Image (cartoon, rainbow, N blue to C red):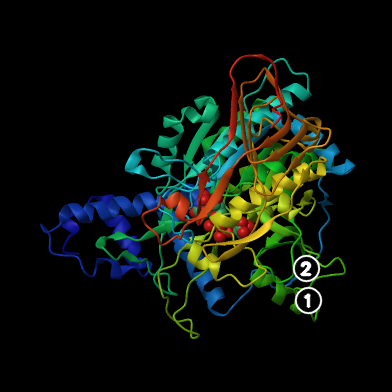
């Protein structure tokens, strides 16, 4: 009350509302008028801004008054916290069953058919990367999706150290390869630019933009890329949803990211969906920031969406029971409601037991769980997506996940907040919606980088490390297995330990997406009998490179422009590039290498560059 003289009528109104909602603790430490007045004004500016996000997020009736955004958020929080305290499951009353979908096997006829359909369809798709997370679990100073060279000399996360390609570069090059391939396969004369949206946050926005601009968008037109920044939401200190103050500033409310589910309301309010629909697009693909294998799975998955006319297609992999991965589950309620949704692994087992499955989350006769494993890459059909968001404004059912101090669940170890997940979008769909999934081989589709070396080294044996080490080795393994399927003799892996993680080390084979996005393309570029030894490195940085009767035991690097057709063969042997172990605690090594536990010792290689159009043969006899 002492400070009322300072405040504008709106701010007084806001202050009264906060007090009425049990938030008077926010003002308890306020000083007398005239002291820190600017900070008090900043408090109201932050509160009204932060809750204007709540208005954006909540259903449309809240749009008229800021208070309704504030009230909705706090009301929702109290309900969810009350449920969480008594361990209420969001699936109470639902019966789980196995949904229908497509299970693909890499390289067979069915897979090739879907890949072809997917590449043709790619020009009717928009790609959305959710990249607002800072990756606390990763404990990495760089940003996850981009290479920040120069600015405080920080290099973000690399997908692999052989070519030092970062995730953002890998994704953009893959989208451009899809764009070109789609035009070629549909004999298109006019090549559509595939739209690419990146959801960022306060933590990642500036540097993501910095990196795109300082790398000329990795070859993509700047007009093709849009950054949408998600805002943070207020933190909550206790079960009564008291707003938490910033521990370092009593005039600021603490905020944290609201989760990747924000992507839907951001897209909806951006107006981009209507622009895409008018441009004839049909699909929106959502994907995460650190899965170096993803674009090996995208063409076939998009082909499934187009062929089966799925409104929602969740990319999935075979899942072992109890694996720390959500399961795609059909849920049917006694009142007739039903949905196909990702059920997080810690909720799947109790849900199945409550439904009368005595073994809960258990493998079936296939040796895998009957519920496909969610890898959180989604393909939504644009038309029905717009219809649904017009109803909901893009608001996704929220959840709360407080870290309680003890079993009494009366206080938190640290403040919590409401969150939402992009894969919860189908929760509001009618039962008639065509919701399916596409299961891909895990070795082909999924190797996210989420854990720092310390945590990864403690992962129980047999469980995935999800580290920079395992993510890079997964790329070499996938590329080796793809070449094996194409008829190349690739020497099997050796087991090695880096940063306390025992991994399979295959030949370091990597190629630009334009060399081969689909298995058919790759098969057409591998002729006669080729072989690659386990210690080899092969880097193909061009589109028209053909391997013919090649025997590689060492390092081979080919750089070629489009239009330069290069046939590579013969016996190539040299000292090659070897992995030299470094420990993640050794701060004398650069962070982007320490995090994977090795650096590459380039002893010797055969490197050829073809910068002119024409036909070339590289066939050394040594
Ligand atoms: N992200 C944002 O863009 N904004 C945010 O506020 C938070 C995250 P995490 P998570 O792949 O195994 C997901 O933190 O959310 C981005 C699925 O929910 O890496 O713990 C962030 O940048 C889970 O079902 O993963 O778990 C990143 O790109 C399972 O599939 C992405 O969202 C799990 O991933 C995921 O954020 C998994």
| Numbered circle sitting on residue 43 | none
Q: Residue furthest bottom?
A: 408
Q: Residue furthest front?
A: 622
Q: Dividing the picture into quarters, in which one does residue 28 lie?
A: bottom left
Quadrant placement of the C terminus = top right
Q: Are marks 2 and 1 in contact (CB under 8 Å)?
A: yes
- Residue sitting nearer the eye, 265 or 349: 349
| For residue 589, above or below residue 390 | below
- Residue sitting nearer the eye, 331 or 502: 502
Give me the residue at 79% from left, 41% from top: 488
Ligand 1 lies in quarter: bottom right
Q: Dividing the picture into quarters, in which one does residue 247 lie?
A: bottom left
Give me the residue at 74% from left, 70% from top: 321
| N-terminal-most mark, 2 or 1 | 2
Quadrant placement of the N terminus = bottom left
Tell me the residue that label 1 is attached to: 355
| For residue 533, above or below residue 551 | below
Q: Left or right of 380: which side holds 85?
A: left
The kind of secondary structure element at disc 2 is: strand
Callout 2 crowding tier (Cα within 10 Å): few <14, some 14–19, many ≥20: many
Query: For the residues marked 2 and 1, what is the alpha-carbon distance in whole angstroms?
Result: 7 Å
Tell me the residue that label 2 is attached to: 96
* Residue 129 image point, x, y percent: 57, 43
Q: Residue furthest left?
A: 34
Give me the residue at 87% from left, 44% from top: 108
* Residue 215 image point, x, y percent: 46, 31
Q: Dividing the picture into quarters, in which one does residue 518 lie?
A: top right
* Residue 160 image point, x, y percent: 56, 46
Inspect this view and state whether residue 47 appears: yes
């Amino acid at each position: 009350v002492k400070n009322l003289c300072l405040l504008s009528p709106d701010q007084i109104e806001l202050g009264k509302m906060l007090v009425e909602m049990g938030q008077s603790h926010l003002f308890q430490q306020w000083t007398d008028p005239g002291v820190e007045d600017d900070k008090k004004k900043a408090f109201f500016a932050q509160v009204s801004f932060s809750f204007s996000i709540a208005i954006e997020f909540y259903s449309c009736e809240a749009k008229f008054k800021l208070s309704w955004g504030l009230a909705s958020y706090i009301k929702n929080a109290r309900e969810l916290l009350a449920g969480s305290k008594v361990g209420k499951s969001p699936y109470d009353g639902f019966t789980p069953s196995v949904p229908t979908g497509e299970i693909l096997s890499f390289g067979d006829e069915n897979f090739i058919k879907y890949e072809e359909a997917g590449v043709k369809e790619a020009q009717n798709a928009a790609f959305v990367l959710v990249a607002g997370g800072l990756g606390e679990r990763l404990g990495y100073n760089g940003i996850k999706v981009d290479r920040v060279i120069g600015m405080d000399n920080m290099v973000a996360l690399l997908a692999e150290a052989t070519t030092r390609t970062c995730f953002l570069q890998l994704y953009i090059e893959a989208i451009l390869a899809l764009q070109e391939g789609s035009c070629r396969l549909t004999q298109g004369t006019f090549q559509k630019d595939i739209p690419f949206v990146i959801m960022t946050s306060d933590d990642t926005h500036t540097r993501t933009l910095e990196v795109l601009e300082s790398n000329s968008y990795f070859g993509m037109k700047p007009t093709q890329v849009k950054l949408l920044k998600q805002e943070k939401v207020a933190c909550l200190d206790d079960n009564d949803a008291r707003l938490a103050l910033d521990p370092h500033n009593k005039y600021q409310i603490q905020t944290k990211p609201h989760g990747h589910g924000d992507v839907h309301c951001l897209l909806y309010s951006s107006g981009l969906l209507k622009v895409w629909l008018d441009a004839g697009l049909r699909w929106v693909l959502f994907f995460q920031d650190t899965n170096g294998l993803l674009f090996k799975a995208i063409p076939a998955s998009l082909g499934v969406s187009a062929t089966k006319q799925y409104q929602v297609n969740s990319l999935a992999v075979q899942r072992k029971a109890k694996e720390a991965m959500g399961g795609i589950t059909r849920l049917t309620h006694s009142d007739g409601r039903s949905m196909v949704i990702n059920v997080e692994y810690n909720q799947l087992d109790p849900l199945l037991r409550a439904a009368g499955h005595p073994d809960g989350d258990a493998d079936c006769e296939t040796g895998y769980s009957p519920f496909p494993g969610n890898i959180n890459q989604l393909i939504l059909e644009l038309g029905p997506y717009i219809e649904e968001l017009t109803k909901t404004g893009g608001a996704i059912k929220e959840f709360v996940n407080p870290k309680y101090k003890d079993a009494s669940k009366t206080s938190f170890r640290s403040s919590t907040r409401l969150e939402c997940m992009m894969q919860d979008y189908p929760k509001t769909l009618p039962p008639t919606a065509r919701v399916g999934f596409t299961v891909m081989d895990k070795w082909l589709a999924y190797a996210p980088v989420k854990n720092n070396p310390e945590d990864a080294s403690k992962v129980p044996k047999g469980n995935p490390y999800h580290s920079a080490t395992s993510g890079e080795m997964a790329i070499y393994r996938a590329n080796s297995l793809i070449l094996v399927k194409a008829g190349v003799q690739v020497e099997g892996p050796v087991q090695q330990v880096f940063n306390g993680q025992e991994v399979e080390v295959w030949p370091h084979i990597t190629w630009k997406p334009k060399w081969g996005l689909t298995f058919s393309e790759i098969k057409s570029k591998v002729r006669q009998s080729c072989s690659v030894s386990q210690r080899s490195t092969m880097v193909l940085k061009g589109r028209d490179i053909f391997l013919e009767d090649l025997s590689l035991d060492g390092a081979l690097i080919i750089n070629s422009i489009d239009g330069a057709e290069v046939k590579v063969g013969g016996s190539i042997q040299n000292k090659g590039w070897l992995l030299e172990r470094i420990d993640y605690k050794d701060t004398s090594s650069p962070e982007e290498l320490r995090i994977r536990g090795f650096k590459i010792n380039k002893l010797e290689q055969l490197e050829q560059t073809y910068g002119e159009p024409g036909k070339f043969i590289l066939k050394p006899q040594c």
